[in-house]
Image (cartoon, rainbow, N blue to C red):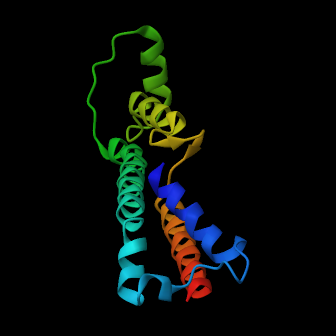
């Protein structure tokens, strides 16, 4: 909440105040105090982006589980008569039990979700770019 409040404060400083009441860097006696004034915004945002990137990494690793399972050679004994019929009609290289497991893993779509959307690395990277553009626009408007 404090990170969002500070970003809203920067928006108010940059865009919403009139020119005679506008906050200027000279009010903080130079660039370094302004940097210290706004620098406490960055650690929570960067930590949030880092956590999202780690979660997206787990999602990407989970997407590679199905090909890994598909590469396994499972030698299972056939017990049912129905399985015997399936085993006789399928080629030797195709293990139907393994295919069922692979399809189950693919269709379950494991990973991290935010508001019903699966989290991917490119989405977090795009969010980081948006944050960088937002900070650049605010700092160029203040300075």
- In the rendered image, residue 112, in percent from the top left (x then y), is placed at 45, 42
Left/right placement of residue 95 relative to residue 11 reads left
- Asked whether 14 or 53 is in front, the reply is 14
- Asked whether 53 or 87 is in front, the reply is 53
Q: In which quarter of the image is residue 139?
A: bottom right
Name above or below for residue 81 compared with residue 8. Answer: above
Q: Quadrant of residue 105?
A: top left
Left/right placement of residue 87 relative to residue 21 reads left
| Residue occupying image coordinates x 50% and y 50% | 119
Name above or below for residue 86 compared with residue 108. Answer: above
Left/right placement of residue 93 relative to residue 125 reads left
Quarter of the image with the C terminus is bottom right
- Asked whether 84 or 40 is in front, the reply is 40
- In the rendered image, residue 67, in percent from the top left (x then y), is placed at 39, 48
- In the rendered image, residue 59, in percent from the top left (x then y), is placed at 42, 48
The number of numbered badges drawn on the structure is 0
| Residue occupying image coordinates x 48% and y 48% | 1
- Asked whether 43 or 127 is in front, the reply is 43
| Residue occupying image coordinates x 59% and y 61% | 8
Name above or below for residue 31 compared with residue 111. Answer: below
């Amino acid at each position: 909440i404090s990170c969002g409040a500070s970003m809203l404060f920067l928006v108010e400083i940059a865009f919403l105040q009139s020119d005679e009441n506008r906050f200027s860097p000279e009010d903080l006696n130079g660039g370094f105090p302004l940097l210290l004034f706004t620098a406490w915004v960055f650690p929570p945002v960067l930590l949030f982006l880092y956590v999202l990137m780690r979660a997206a990494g787990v999602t990407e690793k989970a997407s590679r589980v199905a090909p890994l399972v598909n590469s396994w050679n499972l030698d299972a004994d056939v017990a049912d008569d129905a399985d015997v019929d399936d085993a006789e009609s399928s080629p030797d290289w195709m293990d139907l039990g393994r295919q069922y497991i692979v399809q189950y893993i693919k269709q379950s779509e494991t990973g991290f979700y935010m508001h019903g959307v699966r989290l991917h690395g490119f989405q977090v990277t795009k969010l980081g770019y948006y944050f960088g553009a937002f900070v650049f626009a605010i700092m160029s408007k203040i300075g």
